[in-house]
Image: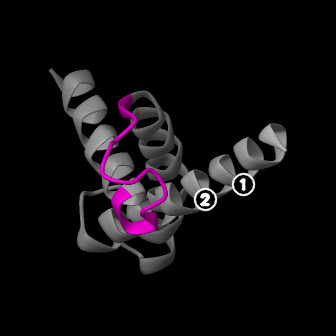
């Protein structure tokens, strides 16, 4: 059950990152959302929670850090994809 929660949270964070960047139009690439959400949540959420002193509990600083991390991962992924197309 915990794994399903982590996957769902990662997908929501990744979808939010795609919406913030607005690069995919109105379509959400769920595979990319899952990958970016999990990677961004791990890196950004962990760093934000530890820097804020919250530990590893689910706090707003970790959620914001997760979203920021996913936005960064999605932006980098889009830039790499554009360079490969050119």
For disc 2, the neighbor class at 10 Å (few under 14, some 14 to 19, many from 20) is some
Residue at the image point whose x is 50% and y is 51% from the top: 40
- Where on the picture, by quarter, is residue 1? top left
Q: Is residue 75 left or right of residue 70?
A: right
Q: Which residue has dot 1 on it? A: 79
Residue 30: x and y, percent? 36, 32
Does 65 appear above or below 86?
A: below
State yes or no: residue 24 in magenta.
Answer: yes
Q: Is residue 29 left or right of residue 43?
A: left
In the current view of this chain or complex, which residue is farthest to the front?
86
Residue at the image point whose x is 53% and y is 64% from the top: 47
Residue 82: x and y, percent? 73, 48
Does 43 appear above or below 81?
A: below
Circles 2 and 1: CB atoms closer than 8 Å = yes
State yes or no: residue 35 in magenta.
Answer: no
Residue 61: x and y, percent? 34, 73
Instruction: Give the numbered dot on residue 75.
Output: 2
Residue 29: x and y, percent? 40, 35
Q: Which residues are magenta?
A: 19-30
Please name whichever residue, 4 or 17, is drawn nearer the observer in this view of the structure: 17
Residue at the image point whose x is 64% and y is 50% from the top: 78
């Amino acid at each position: 059950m915990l794994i399903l929660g982590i996957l769902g949270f990662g997908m929501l964070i990744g979808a939010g990152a795609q919406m913030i960047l607005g690069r995919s139009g109105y379509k959400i690439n769920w595979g990319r959302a899952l990958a970016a959400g999990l990677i961004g949540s791990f890196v950004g959420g962990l760093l934000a929670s530890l820097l804020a002193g919250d530990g590893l509990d689910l706090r707003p600083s970790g959620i914001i850090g997760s979203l920021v991390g996913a936005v960064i991962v999605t932006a980098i992924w889009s830039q790499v994809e554009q360079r490969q197309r050119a």
